[in-house]
């Protein structure tokens, strides 16, 4: 009877990636926290004690209650328990945070995917075509990146007016240039390799060369950038909402929840801003931990160091 041992050369790319990723316990913890937050956001309607968007469920008499308080008494007995307290509208903070996390993650992920798609297309087009089109697109990218992201987002939101969709559009407009530059740099390196020359020698169409050969080899660095940009998108959306230029007040994100409680901090009602702030910080930290480890795993030079 013989036994076989799987060597590193026999491992699939995914298995090798997971093994290398697991070398950092902090990154594994970040991935576990991020997974828990994603599940909490997806299952918010099931986990939340209250629908914070349903005005019929809100009671103004329950506004600004400290954590662990019961709501106003009813004929049937004491009101519901608010584990994390309530805000100035009588909204359960735990429910508001779960739904706010859902909005913040949703906007961040959707905006990142849209910006990634747009930037990848333009970056590949610039690298493969070259010439004047490449120069024009890269000058536009340089101009875009020369302005602070928050300034561009503020101008666009002012022109488009606040709203979930408009916030996503502003985030796409801010982020696409990062992906375009990253994809172009990776595509220029890959374009000089022999497999691209072989594909061109076989008279394959440009679209097939770009989509079947060039694009797959440019994706690893772009995915790492996208993971980092999700955290930036969530942070930028929270900033816009904190300034009152983000999502509507009827559908508050974490940033808007923090802004709503800011005016009550000096009155000792800390929970309205503190708990959403901790959740926002935890979300961004978990995403950054995962993204940093993915960057290290996908970069052979960093692995050797």
Image (tube, rainbow, N blue to C red):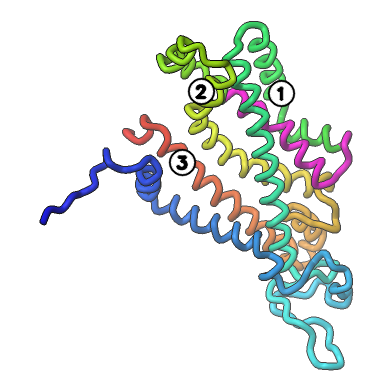
Q: Residue at x 65, y 60 (%)?
A: 42
Along the viewing direction, whichever of 226 and 255 lies nearer the viewer: 226
202 in relation to 294, above or below? above
The disc placed on residue 214 is 2
Q: Position of residue 241 (x, y in %)?
A: 78, 48
Q: Residue at x 71, y 18 (%)?
A: 140
Query: Residue reaching furthest front?
Result: 203
Q: Position of residue 130 (x, y in %)?
A: 60, 10
> Helix or strand or loop: what does disc 3 sit on?
helix
The residue that mark 1 highlights is: 144
Q: Is residue 165 magenta?
A: yes
The magenta stretch spans which residues?
Answer: 158-182
> Helix or strand or loop: what does disc 1 sit on?
helix
* Total numbered circles: 3
Q: Local crowd at mark 2 within 10 Å, few (<14), some, or many (≥20)?
A: many
Asked if the residue at tag 3 contacts the one at tag 1, i.e. Cβ–Cβ closer than 8 Å, the answer is no
Taking the image as shown, residue 249 lies to the left or right of residue 44, namely right
Mark 3 or 2: the one toward you? 2
The disc placed on residue 294 is 3
Using the rendered image of the protein, determine whether residue 80 is visible from the camera's viewpoint. Answer: yes
- Cα–Cα span, label 2 and label 1: 25 Å
What secondary structure characterizes most of the magenta part? helix
């Amino acid at each position: 009877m013989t036994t076989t041992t799987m060597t590193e050369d026999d491992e699939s790319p995914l298995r090798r990636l997971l093994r290398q990723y697991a070398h950092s316990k902090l990154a594994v913890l970040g991935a576990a926290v991020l997974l828990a937050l994603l599940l909490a956001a997806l299952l918010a309607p099931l986990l939340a004690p209250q629908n914070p968007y349903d005005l019929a469920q809100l009671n103004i008499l329950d506004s600004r209650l400290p954590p662990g308080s019961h709501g106003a008494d009813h004929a049937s007995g004491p009101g519901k328990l608010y584990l994390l307290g309530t805000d100035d509208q009588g909204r359960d903070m735990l429910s508001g945070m779960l739904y706010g996390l859902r909005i913040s993650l949703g906007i961040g992920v959707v905006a990142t995917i849209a910006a990634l798609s747009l930037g990848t297309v333009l970056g590949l087009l610039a690298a493969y075509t070259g010439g004047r089109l490449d120069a024009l697109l890269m000058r536009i990218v340089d101009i875009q990146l020369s302005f602070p992201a928050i300034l561009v987002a503020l101008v666009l939101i002012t022109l488009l007016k606040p709203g979930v969709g408009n916030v996503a559009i502003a985030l796409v407009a801010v982020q696409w240039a990062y992906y375009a530059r990253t994809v172009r740099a990776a595509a220029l390196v890959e374009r000089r390799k022999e497999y691209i020359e072989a594909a061109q020698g076989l008279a394959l169409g440009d679209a097939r060369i770009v989509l079947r050969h060039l694009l797959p080899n440019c994706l690893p660095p772009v995915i790492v950038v996208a993971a980092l940009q999700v955290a930036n998108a969530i942070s930028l959306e929270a900033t816009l909402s904190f300034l009152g230029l983000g999502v509507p007040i009827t559908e508050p994100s974490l940033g808007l929840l923090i802004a709503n409680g800011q005016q009550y901090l000096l009155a000792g009602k800390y929970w309205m801003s503190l708990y959403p702030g901790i959740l926002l910080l935890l979300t961004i930290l978990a995403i950054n931990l995962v993204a940093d480890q993915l960057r290290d795993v996908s970069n052979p030079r960093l692995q050797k160091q």
